[in-house]
Image (cartoon, grey):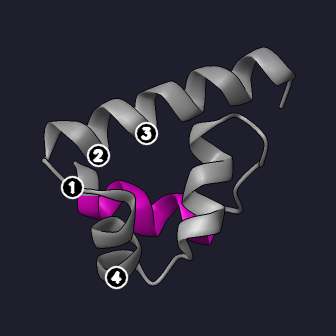
């Protein structure tokens, strides 16, 4: 993924999380993805694996 794509993905993930009124900690607890990884994804600093992305999408969609 290009950096712009990672930034866009992070913004969409943050919007989806906030749309469900979840904190990063709550999303972490529900998805079993670390808070640190969620923060990095939302900042566009991490390219999540398919399994991580799937876990986050199932909770936020």
Residue receiving disc 2? 17
For label 2, the crowd category at 10 Å Cα-Cα, with few meaning under 14, some 14 to 19 and many 20 or more, is many
In which image quadrant can residue 8 be found? top right
Circle nearer the N terminus (3, 4)? 3
The CA span between labels 4 and 2 is 13 Å
Residue plotted at (26% across, 52% down): 60
The answer to which of 50 and 5 lies nearer the viewer is 5
Residue plotted at (16% across, 36% down): 19
Can you give x and y, in whole percent of width and height, for residue 1 in the image?
83, 32
Can you give x and y, in whole percent of width and height, for residue 45 in the image?
78, 41
In which image quadrant can residue 36 be found? bottom right
- The disc at residue 29 is 4
What's the magenta region? 51-59
Does residue 11 sit above or below 50 in this rendering? above
Please say if the residues under marks 2 and 1 sit with CB atoms less than 8 Å apart.
Answer: yes
Circle nearer the N terminus (1, 4)? 1
Element carrying mark 3: helix
Does residue 22 sit above or below 36 in this rendering? above
The CA span between labels 1 and 3 is 11 Å
As for residue 53 lying within the magenta part, the answer is yes
Residue receiving disc 3? 13
Q: Would you say 51 lies left or right of 26 here?
A: right
The CA span between labels 2 and 3 is 6 Å
- The disc at residue 43 is none
The CA span between labels 3 and 4 is 16 Å
Circle nearer the N terminus (1, 3)? 3
Circle nearer the N terminus (4, 2)? 2
In which image quadrant can residue 12 be found? top left
Q: Main secondary structure of the magenta part?
A: helix
Can you give x and y, in whole percent of width and height, for residue 55 in the image?
43, 69
Please say if the residues under marks 2 and 3 sit with CB atoms less than 8 Å apart.
Answer: yes
């Amino acid at each position: 993924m290009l950096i712009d794509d990672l930034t866009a993905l992070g913004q969409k993930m943050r919007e989806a999380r906030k749309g469900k009124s979840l904190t990063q900690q709550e999303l972490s607890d529900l998805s079993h993805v670390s808070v640190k990884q969620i923060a990095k994804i939302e900042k566009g600093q991490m390219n999540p694996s398919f399994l991580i992305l799937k876990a986050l999408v199932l909770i936020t969609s």
